[in-house]
Amino acid sequence: MKITTILGSPRLKGNTSQVLKRFEDIVISKGHTVDRINVIRYQLNGCLGCDKCQKIIDKPGCVQKDDMLNLFDRMIAADAIIYASPLYVWGYTSQMKPLIDRQYCLVKNFDTPEYKSFLRNKLMALLVTCGDKIENNADLIPVIFQRECDYTGGISIGEYIVPFCTTPDQMGDKAEITAVKMAEDLLRYE
């Protein structure tokens, strides 16, 4: 299985990266390949809302000249996509948000008989780390993720939230437990 992981954190060695790295190590040890995208290493502009992409059916069709189309090619080539982000103001980081918004161009003719998605039937998971509890804090981001899965036609394998983590060295066994659970849930689809 080819797995694309997308780290939306501004910190490459933070909490989210630690859990994601452990997940990657597990699936690689089981013979799968991982393509890591660290969004902070790319120029990703926000969506313009111009709808020009919707006029092009056979490819994403975004008119912007940044790194997004390259990332989309990598996502389209994957069997599974893992979205990993620390929680910022109840949602994705500002670094991850352009990628989430611009997935709009990966879906054509939504909610019509001519519906097409470049991410249809891809396995998808959400990994979130946060410094506080889940309730009234990290309870909205899974809703956003599930709606994006529904929109893109992806198959959600789950949402994995690691609460009460402030620094990687204080995560304890939470990172390991979450990474193992994510890997087990994904590998059920082999």
Image (cartoon, rainbow, N blue to C red):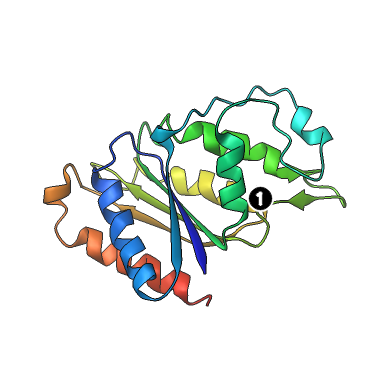
Relative height, residue 124 to residue 9 (above, below) = below
| Whether residue 92 is visible | no
Q: Position of residue 35 (x, y in %)?
A: 45, 55
Residue found at x 77% / y 27%? 52
Q: Position of residue 12 (x, y in %)?
A: 29, 41
Q: Position of residue 95 (x, y in %)?
A: 42, 31
Label 1: element kind: helix
- Judging by the rendered image, the residue that carries numbered circle 1 is 152
Relative to 171, 95 lies left or right: right
Q: Position of residue 165 (x, y in %)?
A: 20, 47
| Whether residue 89 is visible | yes
Q: Nearer the viewer, residue 135 or 188?
A: 188
Residue found at x 78% / y 43%? 108
Residue found at x 52% / y 48%? 145
Residue 56, by quadrant, is top right
Relative height, residue 183 to residue 89 (above, below) = below
Relative height, residue 183 to residue 117 (above, below) = below
Residue 68, by quadrant, is top right
Residue found at x 43% / y 37%? 39
Relative to 163, 82 lies left or right: right
